[in-house]
Image (spheres, coloured by chain):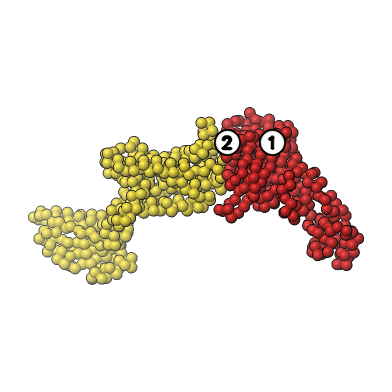
Chain colours: A yellow, B red
Amino acid sequence: MKVFASFVRKEFKHIERDTRTLVILFAMPIILIVLFGFAITTEVKDIRYTVLDMSHDQYTQRLAERFAANRYFIYKGEVSNRQQAMAKFNHGDVDMVIVFGGNFAQELGHCTGGSIQLLLDGSEPNQAATRAGYAQQVIADFAQELQQSSATGQQCNIVPVTHLLYNPQAISAYNFVPGIIGLILMLVCCMMTAIAIVREKESGSMEVLLASPLKAMTIILAKLVPYFVISFADLVIILLLSRYMLGMPFAGNLPAFIGISLIYIIVCLSLGLMISCLCSSQLAAMLISLIMVIPCIYFSGMAFPIESMPTTFQHVSTVMPARWYVSVVRKLMVQGVAVKYVIEETLILAFSAAVLLSIALASFKKRL
Amino acid sequence: MNSIIQAENIVKTYNHHRVQALKGVSFEVEEGEIYGLIGPDGAGKTSLFRILATLLLADSGTATVDGLDVVRDYRKIRNRTGYMPGRFSLYQDLTIEENLKFFATVFGTTIEQNYGLIKDIYQQIEPFKNRRAGKLSGGMKQKLALSCALIHAPRVLFLDEPTTGVDPVSRKEFWEMLQRLKENHGLTIVASTPYMDEAMQCDRIALIQNGQFLTIDTPQGIIAHYDKPLWGVHSDKMHQLLDDLRSWQGCDTAFSFGEQYHLTVKPGVSQAALESYLHGKGHSQVAIAPIEASIEDCFMALMDQPETTMKQ
């Protein structure tokens, strides 16, 4: 036990004295969260828009003026047909096109609701959604005003139809935080552990350790402990940041969430350990972990919804531990469902942890 | 004297038997002696150390250290041996003291418990004990590595090229430390070196080449076995001299040895004959003198005739 404690202390010293590693371990999660956090809460300004007015009546005029007067919008001239509007879009001259339907005033008068279409660039879904929101606000204000000024007090609806070009399915920004948690734990546990063990091989100190009566198990566990602790610290940092900086709700069962996260951390540590058994240089370890981490980003649903993947890829994704973990985070953190709905994921993660850890321990060589 | 290490017909190959590192090596090391493995890079010294230190498995052959089998009782052996790899293998980012403390704990002991053993060596680097190992000079690194290998009071010390990359003064000091360890603590030391001059510091040496032992004897014994006349030759045109010597009909072998060339000659030739030959080639200030063979001369001679190897 004394040997183990002294080994763990040594590991912490290694980490503490390696500034580069320290930065990766603690700055990376913070930077990622802050970056993605701003993608979520970005204040959208200077929305460049153009108007395609097929009605040319007093109402479209007044509504267009409303937009022009709003400080968030910048008027970029009028176009006379859809082709011109698309051309402006394709050149990146505008962010939004407001299309008034042919009989705007009449429709408004008949209270069937004036038809407005908002065309937005969906390749940046978060931005587009925010822009659409602003535009809808302007339109809704206008509709309300019309209603108040109307003598009859009749209901006058203007229902804008929002259409996101290029990517009609806007991905919810809340998707990112669960994904980042999965990714960071993967990077810290898998890559950093692999590198830490391979570094001993590369520097030759593994030779001295093996020539000592230390048991392989002691070496491995002592190597894992610091990264286990750091991963956990990272998890707490991410949770605090997403709760208090990004204002994300934490709807679910916190102890269950932490428990499942610990299982996922063990999965990642075991992966890192396996990599370290395969490689003899830090560079190779880094590359192999990246090869493991990148599919984990693609197939875990961090960035792209699994449901919209081809069936083959959906099957591939089922062997990615990150997929199950991200699903747990989403359910427990964002949706706030009861623990019984994540039992399947938990069992799969626990099973992978057991399998991977046994493989890793079995493949660790007690000689050179 | 009891032999503390016994190796029987050790064979080690790499790359699916394509590279033969050790071609059936047998030897014994007696308790309390300094045993030198002398040979050039790639001779198989490191492979042999790793097999004895239980870090590698031999393809065939058996070896025991302190009566324990290197394969079956590897963990017990690891408690009783100190191993210092050829490359500095301690933690560069830990200080001298932290390294030493760590290895003491790993072996289940403390610095205080075995301080007597390392005192002589550790005292020299103790003033810098808070300096990181990566920032030490070559000689200091070796002293630290030796201290770490000694901290658990091993029965046998394996030193793989301990003086490579170390300045001449530190090399000399290092061998003096080994002598004191042997005399004061009865430690058995097996050390390898590519430096022939260090061979004289050993009680017995094995000359090793291409995975085979050429000979095993005391340094004096090996030199005494050297039976050819040996001349040291020097002239004013040194760069041309070696070629001229080798093309001389009376020449057997000629090698560069620092300031001069060592020449062995065929029977029945005289110094006067060589002198006149060299004058004919345009050399002046020719100096020829019979000299005593060094270990290196013996090594060169043994390398020359691989058929007569393995004489015990």
Residue in view at x 29 percent, y 69 percent: A87
Residue A228 pos. (x, y %): 44, 40
Note whether residue A235 is visible: no
- Mark 1 vs mark 2: tell me if same chain: yes
Q: Which mark is residue B3?
A: 1
Q: Amino acid at mark 1?
A: Ser
The C terminus of chain A: image quadrant: top right
Residue A89 pos. (x, y %): 30, 66
Outermost residue toward the top?
B113
Left or right of A81 on screen, residue B163 = right
Outermost residue toward the right?
B272
Give the quadrant of residue B129. top right
Residue in view at x 24 percent, y 69 percent: A82
**Nearer to me, A134 or B148:** B148
A236 lies above or below A299: above
Mark positioned earlier in the residue sequence (1 or 2): 1
